[in-house]
Amino acid sequence: MTKVEIDPLTRIEGMGKIKVEVENNELKDLKFQITVAPRFFEYLLTGKRAEEAPRLTQRICGICYVSHHLASVKAIENAWGVTPTETAIKLRRLMNAGGYVTSHSLHSAFLAVPDLIGLPEDGRNFIALMGKYPEIGKAALKIHAYGNKVVEASGGRIVQVVTSVPGGQTLALKEERRRELLEEGKEVLELMKVYADFVFDVYEKDSLVCSQFPDLETNFMGLVNGPDDHYDVYDGKGRIISGTGKEVVKFDTNYYYNYIQEAVWEHSSTKVPYYKPEGVNGNLRVGPLARLNVASKLPWPVAHEYEERYLKLFPRPCLQVQGFNLARIPELIAGQEEVLQMLEDPQITSTDIRKPVKSRGGEGASFIEAPRGVLTHHYVIDDNGLIRYANIMAPTTYNHPLIQHDLYANAKIYASEFADKKKRAEACWRLEKIVRAYDPCTSCSVHMVDFDLKVDGKMVEVREVS
């Protein structure tokens, strides 16, 4: 029996590991474990004033904070029947798009692409990428920094933003700052094109890059908007399609619980959501790959050009896991084009950014597309404005069982290599690449802990699920 642990998994947010067991050159078992300790944010919210939730929940993560901030405030507004001002919504869309620029540039250039460009085994990292392709590395750094500037201008600070409150925003965008961001943003869009062409060139010249990962047929879920179901990452209806591209259901996200149920696994501290009518095997894949499968098109011209280029390699519905990494490129450009669209809107500097709101009882849920996929916040608020129930489902909870399946499928093919010390490093690297393709945010996903206590010398099993 050969037992291999990949611990820690590298170039992901948070902590995780993979356990592989091989016997007689055949795979006996594989487990993908998220090992971040749960922080029980749902419990921490219980009894708090609802308007505190957008500030508290973004502390779940130092990368997805914009997404949690916005999903939280939208859920409260849905519970209270509040519609923020048009300028407030545009400022939120600006912040959300800036978050995409920051997150997608971080994952693509710093975490994923070093796996794809033929770097030596001991140098698959961003530093080595900078050494081999300095102009690409510099472009990635500038793109990432610009996204942070947009988030700071609309969110009040770069990390853990503070401006979204029930009824609107607390910070207006100054005209001078708008002009500065718009001017720099146009330059950054040109840098994105250079970076995008570089990544597409890798895929278009190396067919193996496009086909080396598993391609399980699953359901896909994402937000869509408008009569033509176009791409939207801030608002819209939830849409689920099958692995063959057939629409399964389209639903009001405020009533997501009619369609989505959650379970827990013995070996990991994450919850596992699934499509309720299909039972626990009704997996839902979310994220960039799912969004480009579910939506009809990207509604920005440059992003749509790259989407068409993407679809030549990964036609809809794409099942190939490697499609995640390339799908982020049209989305990165879409984020930048939405930033520019918002900055060019004369209403963006209006001071009509907030409606007066009184706390009240109610129940509300919201979906927002975090860079890694659908993020759900759901609150029940009592008549005193206190949260009595909170539920949060992060993208990695949806993708967790798919990551597990894809790792198992790959390890089964290369089982003999785990038993061979000379080939083991390469086999482990293949598994890490699969995990990185999903860009899991493990800190967002943890909601369950299983531990043992001794009471009067006797072992007592305790399980907590938040």
Image (tube, rainbow, N blue to C red):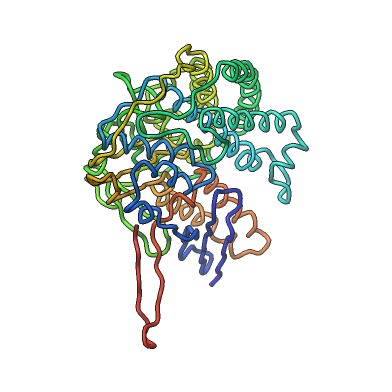
Residue 431 image offset from top left, x and y in percent = 55, 52
Residue placed farthest to the right in the image? 131
Total labels: the figure holds: 0
Where does the C terminus fall, quadrant-wise? Answer: bottom left
Residue 403 image offset from top left, x and y in percent = 45, 50
**Residue 253 figure quarter:** top left
Residue 251 image offset from top left, x and y in percent = 25, 33
Is 423 on the left or on the right of 316, as rendered? right
**Residue 208 figure quarter:** top right
Q: Nearer the viewer, residue 365 or 352?
A: 352
**Residue 157 figure quarter:** top right
Residue 98 image offset from top left, x and y in percent = 53, 29
Q: Is residue 285 above or below residue 95?
A: below
Residue placed farthest to the bottom in the image? 457
The residue that appears at 25% across and 46% down in the rendered structure is 384
Q: Is residue 229 above or below residue 413?
A: above
The residue that appears at 65% across and 18% down in the rendered structure is 187
Is 272 on the left or on the right of 407, as rendered? left
Is 163 on the left or on the right of 192, as rendered? left
Q: Is residue 325 above or below residue 300?
A: below
The residue that appears at 55% across and 19% down in the rendered structure is 174
Residue placed farthest to the top in the image? 346
